[in-house]
Amino acid sequence: MTLTTPPLTDEDERLARKYELWEELPEGYREAAARIASFQALAELVGVLPFAEWVDRAPDYERKQMLVAKVQDEVGHGHVTARVAEDLGVGREQILVDFAEGRTKLLNIFHYGFESWEELGPAALLMNSSAIVQFQALDQGTYLPYARALRKIEKEESFHYHHAIDLTHQTMVRGSVAQRQRAQEAFELWLPRLLAYFGPPDSDTYQQNPMYRFGLKVKSNDTLRQEWLTKIVPVFQELGIFVDPALARFDEDRQAWDYASPDWVETKRIIKEGGPRYGDWRSKIQLSLERNGAYRDAALARAAA
Ligand SMILES: [Fe+2]
């Protein structure tokens, strides 16, 4: 018996198609790919600011080294993704200027800072694990330079993930009752933020979004949110964090997670108007643009000569 595969439809072929920078890109594709890469570049750079301000307050030298390594990696991720965006026509300086001048919105999780050292471990663990789940889906996308950049970034995110586990473990095993309590509260504070970070529930028409039509995104918000919960909830339970079933609970019948629905109104407000630290991050970026302006101008003049 011969098995025949049905002929590829135009749609199948379009979805299977992947692109390099120098190939002819469909209309609107370049802009969409630039948007996704520049958005990530900014998220990497701003996302590290709350960690960077804890470097001076790390409780010992070893933790300080680990934190510095993480900060350095994240800035590197910003450079790598900004380079992808730059090739597509969005200059790296433009990404920062647009943010400093208030033209770019940040994802909800990047609007906050940390109130205590014990908050860093659980918050970083939630953030790193969700980034890994997101990137492992995005690296299946159709724009190959971005997919390659993500695969490089994932390796370092994996290091950060293990660092965050170690940090949380240290608090849960060697910390005082008050410290363990702060880790528990950090988990409960950040879990809903991260649930919201995956974006609104899937609409019936989400696949019409250019990111999906171009194959730059391949998995829906709800699919990723479910995958993430499957991965991360057991990790926290093993670390000794209590996961309240009202926050997240696996429904055996549906074979899916139930979770406390994020406050979408508040999430939208934060993104639109800015959360508690949004203004600080903007002025930090503005200051660094000003401070480094003279060096940037000299380097650009030299390169042009
Ligand atoms: Fe990163």
Image (cartoon, rainbow, N blue to C red):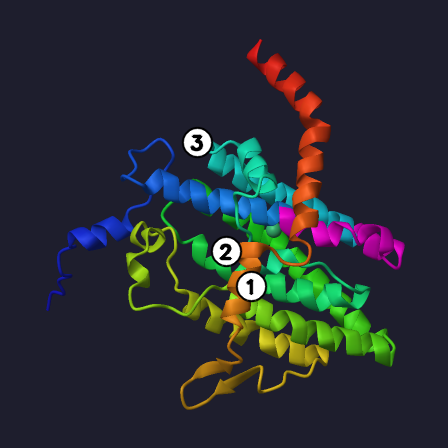
* Residue 132, above or below 260: above
Along the polypeptide, which appears first: circle 3 or circle 1?
A: 3
Task: Give whichever of 210, 228 is nearer the camera.
Answer: 210
Disc 1/disc 2 C-alpha distance (Å): 9 Å
Q: Which residue is mark 1?
A: 130
Q: Which residue is mark 3?
A: 89
Q: Are marks 3 and 2 in contact (CB under 8 Å)?
A: no
Amino acid type shown at disc 2: Phe
Residue located at (69% from left, 30% from top) = 290
> Does any portion of residue 72 appear in the rendered image?
yes
Along the polypeptide, which appears first: circle 3 or circle 2?
A: 3
Residue located at (67% from left, 32% from top) = 289
Instruction: Judge from the rendering whether residue 148 lies leftward or rightward of residue 160; answer left or right.
Output: left
Along the polypeptide, which appears first: circle 1 or circle 2?
A: 1
Q: Are marks 3 and 1 in contact (CB under 8 Å)?
A: no
Disc 3/disc 2 C-alpha distance (Å): 22 Å
Judged by depth in the image, the label closer to the viewer, 3 or 2, is 3
Q: Residues within 10 Å of mark 2 (few under 14, many from 20)?
A: many
